[in-house]
Image (spheres, rainbow, N blue to C red):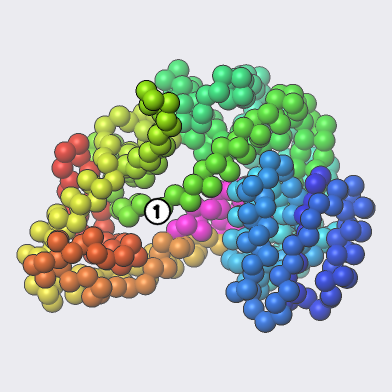
Amino acid sequence: MRAIAYFSLYNDNFSFDDLKEKFNVFCMNNLHQTIKVFCDRSANSFNNDSAYIELVKYIQNSQSSYLVVIPSIYHFGNDLEAVIRKTCDIETLGAKVVCANDDYPDPIQNALKELDFGTVSKLKSENIKSGMINKALQGKVLGKPPYGYTQGISGGLEIVENESKLVKLLFQKYVHENIGLRKLAAFLNKEKYQNRRGKEWNVLAIRHILKNPVYTGTYIRYGFRLPKSHNSIIESNLYRQAQDIMKGKYVARNANNALPFLLSGLINCYKCGEKMMGVTRRQRWKTKDGRINRNIYRYYQCKSKNSQGTCNYVTWKEDELEDLVALKIYEHLSNKSNDSFIDQLERNTENNNIELRNAERNFYKAVNKVAKGNMNLIELNKYIDKLDLTRRPAVLDKIEFSDPTFFKTWSNYNFDSKREFLVNSISKILVKKRSIEILD
C-alpha cells in the first residue's frame, strides 16, 4: 500500500531520523510504498500538532488511499480518547492507521494494551487480542460477517446469494448509473428491499457497503490485508471506480467548509418523530448572456427523508425556522419568573452531567466492540459526537430573555452563545409544516 508516516516527538525518545529509518524498514518488510512523512517536532505539548492537521488536509485533497503509519499510539496522544479521535478522523477520510508494532499493529488494540483500558485483567485482555489477531491472519471472521457473506464451517467468509445480488446492484447503480447514496436508499426502500434485520436501508449502511474492500475478496483486520482470502462479489476495478467517485464527492464537500446549523439535534419532525438535519444545496446555472451564477441554499429537513427517502413532510428554510424558534422561545420563557427560569437551567445542567456520564460509558463500550471486531471505526464517530454534545458548558445568563428588546437583538449574538442557550433552555422542538411546538 501507499504509506505515509506521522511522528510526534513529544512522547518519543527517538530522534526524527531514527523514526524515519524505522518507518522505511517497516515499509520495506511489509511491501509498502513510502510516500511522505509528517512530523510534529514540538517536544512540550500535543496542542501544537500542526503537522497532523497538514496530514489530514493532504489525505483530503488526494485522490488515493493511504496507510498512515505511526510508531506507537503515543504519537497520537496520552489517553485512549485522543488516540481514537485521530484514528477515526483518518478512517473517515478513507485511509487506514497502523502502528509499526508487529504484535499489535491495530491502533485500537495497541491503545487498549498500552493504556490498560477495560474491565478485564491485562493478561486476559492480551490473550484475547492475540487470539483475534491469529484469526485475522487466517482470514477467519471476527464479529458479524459483512452483508453479502456468512461465516462458513471453516470460519471464513462464504457468499450469501440473494444478498450478493443486492451488493452488485448497489455498485452498478452507483458507478455506472451515477445514482447517489440518498437516491439509492430511496430506491431500495421503494422497491421493498430490507436489510438483515428486516428494516429499511439508510445512507450510512449503503456507504459502508460501497467502501468495504471485502467484496473484492480482500480481508482486512488489525492492519493485515489478505487478498483472495475468500470469493469476491465484485471486480476490483468496479470497487476502485466507486472509491474514486466517493473520494471526489467527499473532497468537494470538505472544500466548501460549510457552517454548522444552529438547531442541529434540537428539532424533530412532528409527523414521524425523526430528528431534522441541516442540509446545504449548491446550485449553478447559466444566464442568457452566458454568465455563470451560483447560490447556496440551506434548510432543515427530516432525517428520514435524507437517509431513507421515506418522509416528505417537513422542510424549512434555515433563516425562517431559526427566526421562528427565537420568537417562540422568547414568548415561552418571558412568561416565567426569573427564579423559575434559573431553576430550569440548573436542572438542565444536572441532566447534562448525567448525560455526560452515560455518553462516556457508552463510548468506552463502543471502543470494546471495535476491539472485538463487532463494530467499525466509522460507527465510533457517533459516540464521539455524543461526547462533544454533552460536554457543553453550562450557561445561565449569556442571553437575557426577560429583556423586551431580546428578539430584536437576537441576531447580534454569536453562534456559540445562541447555541449554548438553546441547548440549556429547551429539550426539544417539534416542527410542523407551518408552525412549531416548544418542549422544555
Q: Nearer the viewer, residue 221 or 48?
A: 48
Residue 91: give x, y in percent of width and height: 64, 50
Question: Could you tell me which quadrant the N terminus lies in?
Answer: top right
* Residue matched to label 1: 260
Report the magenta stretch's main SS.
helix
Q: Is residue 210 visible?
A: no
The magenta region covers 365-386
Q: Name the residue at 35% across, 40% down.
A: 297
Left or right placement of residue 151 versus residue 249 in this view: right
393 displayed left or right of 62: left
In the rendered image, which quarter is residue 10 located in? bottom right
Q: How many marks?
A: 1
Q: Would you call the spot at circle 1 few (<14 residues within 10 Å), some (14-19), or many (20 or more)?
A: few
**What amino acid is found at the position of numbered circle 1 in the picture?**
Pro
> Percent x, y for residue 318?
29, 46
As drawn, 100 above or below 175: below
Can the viewer see residue 319?
A: yes
Residue at (75, 43) in percent of width and height: 220
Q: Nearer the viewer, residue 423 or 144?
A: 423
Taking the view exactly as shown, the residue that stands out farthest to the bottom is 44
Q: Position of residue 170 (x, y in %)?
A: 58, 24
Q: Identify the residue at the far front of this view.
A: 289
Q: Is residue 202 above or below residue 415?
A: above
- Please say whether residue 284 is one of the residues in the magenta stretch: no
Which residue lies at the image location 51% right of the left edge and 43% below the top edge? 253
- Secondary element type, mark 1: loop
Figure quadrant of residue 354: bottom left
Closest to the observer, 353 or 77:
77
209 sits to left or right of 383: right
Picture coordinates of residue 68, whole percent (x, y): 74, 54
Vertical side of 142 occupied by 19: above or below? below
Residue at 63% from the left image edge and 61% from the top image edge: 53
